[in-house]
Amino acid sequence: MEAAAGGGCGSGPPLLLSEGEQQCYSEIFARCIGAAGGGAGSGPPEAARVPPGTATAAAGPVADLFRASQLSAETLHQITELCGAKRIGYFGPTQFYVALKLIAAAQSGLPVRIESIKCELPLPRFTMSKTDGEIRFGNPAELHGTTVQIPYLISEKNTFKRMDDEDKQQETQSPTMSPLASPPSSPPHYQRVPLSHGYSKLRSSTEQMHPAPYEARQPLVQPEGPSLGGQGTKPPRHQASLIRSFSVEREPQDNSNYPDEPWRITEEQREYYVNQFRSLQPDPSSFISGSVAKNFFTKSKLSIPELSYIWELSDADCDGALTLPEFCAAFHLIVARKNGYPLPEGLPPTLQPEYLQAAFPKPKWECALFDSYSESMPANQQPPDLNRMEKLSIKDMADFPVPTQDVTGDDKQALKSTTDEALPKDMSEDPATPKDSSSLKARPRSRSYSSTSIEEAMKRGEDPPTPPPRPQKTHSRASSLDLNKVFQPSVPATKSGLLPLPPALPPRPCPSQSEQASEAELHPQLNRAPSQAAESSPTKKDVTHSQPPSKPIRRKLRPENQATENQEASTTVGGPASVGAVKPHPTVQKQSSKQKKAIQTAIRKNKEANAVLARLNSELQQQLKEVHQERIALENQLEQLRPVTVL
Amino acid sequence: MAVCVAVIAKENYPLYIRSVPMENELKFHYMVHTSLDVVDEKVSAMGKALVDQRELYLGLLYPTEDYKVYGYVTNSKVKFVMVVDSSNTALRDNEIRSMFRKLHNSYTDVMCNPFYNPGDRIQSRAFDSMVTSMMIQVC
């Protein structure tokens, strides 16, 4: 090396490199060559470590490297001149080493002279910005970096030993590829040392200094624990290509965690996704249907083709429904896309359903599991942007419930109340299901009118404020009807009277009691007693009963309401009925009168039914108009908000 | 392998049509278009009573001197038309059937995507890749 340096350096003095310097410089040089000469390959550094005399580093990567040394341009010019590259037009190994040494000198404050490099100098420091470093230098190292990151190595003994050696030598050197392998790389260090960026940078630096061990390590890769499953050996190339594309997009950040693994879901995100899943589908082991998911994801304001593609990626079994891991993957892809990441060509291995299911088993609420995961998972790979966005979003989530609640709460409540009333009409006495479905329907409806900023799109899944207290079970349909209030006091009575007391056959009514009997007939006939005949038999007792008369015709309607309505109707009709009933001669035409009364009461009953139904109809029409008005109001709001939205 | 693959909707407009890139792709489009008549003929010939037993694979629709056109119709009246090179004698009926089956499966996967509106053009990448695998590599 020295001879060559002496020979090739031309006017410069012989270059003396210490062992550490030599290693370091040769590494950097190799990387420059590798980056220049087709960096996508995985050229083992040994191969790239060509004999010094034959290699030249391309100007591009070298320029980037020099820039990363954070020296002034003038200084760099001087250095290039001095080292002889300008003269000969390329960076041969000797020139390169001289340049590096000069950089070290300049960084230590020495003047840029040939004489400076004669003495022992610390290693030059390079703080690469991410984009530069990764694009140029990252290609081979990214690969290695990724091979380290994704599979959490267990066989760290080699690396650790090597790192110890290198640590001593290269402690002061900021790694050129630090961005890439920074946080997630070595699990052993996780377990030992809390992951600090500086330390990780160091580690990555040492790792990158010797990419060779990575390749040796690669076959030794073993997933850490059962959780990481078999995805550990997924082709790192794929990751590298992905990461390369991501890194290009990201802004340079000096001391931050780099997004080497943007497709990995952190614990926090996972919890968020699961909560969203729960809001759509209470059973975590079941799945979300396509339409529900579509409504949900449409709120993210991504374009339909993109959403379609995300669905294609995440719905692995193409069944038109999303299980929990599929949903998490889809959500994560959406989040990533919103943050500007391009969508991958295929589902990343960390988002595969098997991986997700293994990584985050369903009953994931155990602390023990969490501890083991929290060490390895959260500290890693999450791109800071993604993380920050998520944190932001989750914080916004907390903040936003208030404003959105104000904005949409009223609408939601109005919608919900109307849907509440609308739904039970169709269903028989089951308020539980209308509650769920109406709340489900109401929630997306209200959310669709929320604003469209990213944060709100993120928190779109936040659970809506608790719905207004459900109307009473018995009057859920008629909550808007006056009957509710009117017959409120009679509720207990009706409830108690729900049990259709088979009216005990009273003794035959004597003529003197005909009037009373006729009234009584009305009531029992309006009873829920099964047969008309039984009903027609007068039951004086029923008069005193405040029993809910109900009609078999009105089975659809709530029986209590029926009862109350009937009661009301019957009371109004009772008067004329009784009058009419008195007319027929009691003694002689008892039976025929009874029959007539039966017919008449039946007629009256039908009329009452008609009246009640007509009233219901008008009420419903009223509600429909109100809903229409609300809808128009909401649409107006949306129109007003639309020019304000960014996306 | 196929030279041209087309998916025609029930209303006889194309949802997806792709040919091997050659000079006159329009020719394939015309062929597919004319084959629709033959498809309708075959479908109606089976009669309404036989709808249940109607086979999805229609077989050779019509041959030209250079190409052969095969058809397949789904239960929702979506038609798949495939044009193959006549010189490719190694292609047997079973292979054509299997190709149509793959097409059908991919099509149902596209349908399962809730973001796909029936009647839109098919833009699924998975579908594209499947069709590519079936088409001849000309160059």
Image (cartoon, coloured by chain):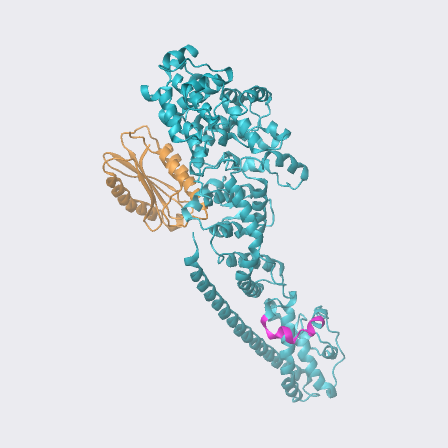
In front here: A142 or B26? A142
For the question of whether residue B75 can be seen, the reply is no
Specify the principal SS of the magenta part.
helix
What residue lies at 35% left-to-right and 44% top-to-bottom?
B79
Image height check: is A490 above or below A513? above
Tell me where residue A421 appears, x and y as whole percent: 57, 66
Tell me where residue A326 appears, x and y as whole percent: 53, 42
Quadrant that contains the C terminus of chain B = top left
Name chain A's colour: cyan
In front here: A152 or A98? A98
Dividing the picture into quarters, in which one does residue A523 lie? bottom right
Magenta segment: A480-492
What residue lies at 61% left-to-right and 38% top-to-bottom?
A361
Image height check: is A42 above or below A347? above
Dividing the picture into quarters, in which one does residue A473 lie? bottom right
Quadrant that contains the N terminus of chain B = top left
Decide whether residue A601 is among the magenta residues. Answer: no
Chain ID, orange in image: B
Relative to residue B56, is residue A24 drawn left or right? Answer: right
Residue lying at the far top of the rendered structure: A3
Number of callouts in the render? Answer: 0
What residue lies at 49% left-to-right and 57% top-to-bottom?
A450
Decide whether residue A485 is among the magenta residues. Answer: yes
Tell me where residue A411 appears, x and y as whole percent: 53, 63
Tell me where residue A423 appears, x and y as whole percent: 56, 63
Relative to residue A467, is residue A84 drawn left or right? Answer: left
In front here: A82 or A481? A82
For the question of whether residue B10 can be seen, the reply is yes
